Image (cartoon, rainbow, N blue to C red):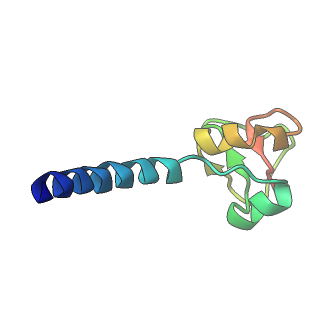
Amino acid sequence: MKKVMMAVLSLTLVFGGTLTASAAEKAKTYKNCTELNKDYPGGVAKSADTKNKGGKTKKKPHVSKELYEANKKSDRDKDGIACEK
């Protein structure tokens, strides 16, 4: 009985840790650009090839498709860069 309980506990820890890691990898959704720019001062771009429609920016955006998709509501000019500065 002890061996069975140890096996179940071991599997729970192994798979539980994997599920927790996957949840941590999900992109964070920010409330507004002020919050997003605290972590990513140049904003977040969908891809490295994305060009800013608004002209030159002061800072280079962080490139992450997942993070952009989670925060695309903050991309006012729909150029593929959320909260660019």
At 51% across and 49% down in the image, what residue appears?
23
At 28% across and 53% down in the image, what residue appears?
14
Q: How many marks?
A: 0
Residue 48 visible (yes or no): no
Q: Position of residue 21 (x, y in %)?
A: 43, 53
Tell me: 27 left or right of 18. Answer: right
- Residue that protrudes farthest toward the top in the picture: 78
Q: Where is residue 76 in the image (x, y as percent from the top left)?
A: 88, 39
At 36% across and 55% down in the image, what residue appears?
17
Give the camera-side residue of 56 and 46. Answer: 46
At 84% across and 44% down in the image, what residue appears?
55
Residue 3 visible (yes or no): yes
Give the camera-side residue of 71 and 42. Answer: 71
Give the camera-side residue of 54 and 69. Answer: 69
Tell me: 14 left or right of 70. Answer: left
Give the camera-side residue of 6 and 81. Answer: 6
Q: Where is residue 28 in the image (x, y as percent from the top left)?
A: 65, 51
Q: Where is residue 65 in the image (x, y as percent from the top left)?
A: 60, 38
